[in-house]
Image (tube, grey):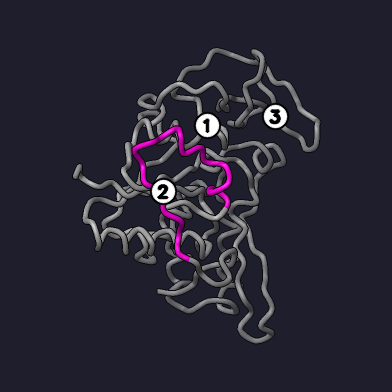
């Protein structure tokens, strides 16, 4: 049997990770104990949706769920910048750190205070590492120029482009770069020259693009991924559904 490469993918999914990401990690570790090999985390920090990093925690006293998220410098950055280019505001970190003792343990608050990262994706990844979730896991980031340069060309993709002082992620369609404003509304922006280092895939082309670099033998699929990944894109890959976990969309706050 070829050397197993067990992969799972996920966007930055909260400054404390959502529980479904932890379920993927635990599923990968269980499988590794059975077959050996290496675990690879495809960290899709090219995504731009600010809702990905909503972090749902529970108030220790009222037992009500509270949704927290990063604050963003401006509207364009919030709506259109990829997560690796959304900047962390120091005042947001200080303010949130003062609130966190109502929701999570002191060690987690200390980890949160100790993070010194300039962008949202780095911040999330640092926290996941501090929580011990990524020990002996190789992380491959969709935002790195090297990963993008090695990836296969796809027909449906986004382009990182400068627009009004920010890096934005624009959909390429019919020779145009478009920012999705919601519904059927799009804003066309100037289309300068771009190469593979600026390209990231859409949802439907993401697995094939990722697999062309990682070449995994096993892939841990999340609940939504099971509906849109085209397994025919990788006939030699064995797809495994992630283990079930309670409150999957809420923050994992254990150490």
Pick the front one: 185 or 154:
154
Query: Which circle's residue, 2 or 3, is located before the other in the chain?
Result: 3
Residue sitting at x 55%, y 58% = 14
State the SS at label 3: strand
Q: Which residues are magenta?
A: 224-243
Pick the front one: 175 or 230:
230
Which mark, residue 205? 1
Kindly indicate the quadrant of the structure image that contains residue 99. Answer: bottom right
Is residue 178 depicted above or below 11 in this figure?
above
The Cα–Cα distance between marks 2 and 3, rounded to whole angstroms, is 33 Å
Estimate how packed mark 1 is, as few (under 14), some (14 to 19) or many (20 or more) residues with alpha carbons within 10 Å.
some
Residue sitting at x 50%, y 35% = 206
**Depth-wise, is mark 2 or mark 1 nearer the camera?**
2
- Please state the horizontal and vertical placement of residue 66, each as a whole percent of the image: 67, 70
The residue tagged 3 is 179
The Cα–Cα distance between marks 2 and 1, rounded to whole angstroms, is 17 Å
Kindly indicate the quadrant of the structure image that contains residue 73. Answer: top right
The residue tagged 2 is 239
């Amino acid at each position: 049997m070829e050397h197993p490469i067990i992969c799972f993918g996920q966007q930055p999914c909260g400054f404390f990770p959502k529980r479904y990401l932890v379920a993927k990690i635990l599923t990968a570790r269980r499988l590794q104990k059975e077959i050996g090999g290496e675990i690879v985390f495809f960290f899709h920090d090219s995504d731009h949706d600010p809702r990905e990093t909503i972090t749902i925690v529970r108030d220790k006293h009222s037992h009500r769920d509270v949704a927290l998220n990063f604050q963003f410098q401006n509207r364009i950055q919030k709506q259109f910048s990829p997560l690796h280019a959304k900047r962390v505001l120091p005042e947001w970190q200080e303010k949130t750190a003062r609130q966190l003792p109502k929701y999570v343990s002191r060690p987690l608050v200390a980890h949160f205070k100790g993070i010194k990262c300039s962008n949202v994706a780095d911040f999330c990844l640092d926290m996941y590492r501090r929580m011990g979730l990524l020990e002996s896991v190789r992380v491959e980031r969709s935002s790195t120029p090297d990963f993008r340069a090695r990836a296969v060309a796809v027909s449906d993709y986004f382009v990182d482009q400068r627009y009004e002082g920010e890096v934005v992620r624009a959909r390429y369609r019919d020779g145009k770069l478009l920012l999705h404003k919601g519904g059927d509304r799009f804003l066309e922006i100037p289309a300068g020259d771009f190469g593979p280092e600026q390209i990231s895939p859409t949802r439907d082309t993401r697995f094939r693009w990722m697999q062309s670099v990682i070449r995994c033998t096993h892939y841990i699929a999340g609940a939504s991924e099971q509906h849109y990944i085209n397994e025919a894109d990788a006939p030699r890959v064995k797809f495994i559904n992630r283990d079930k976990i309670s409150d999957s969309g809420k923050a994992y706050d254990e150490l």
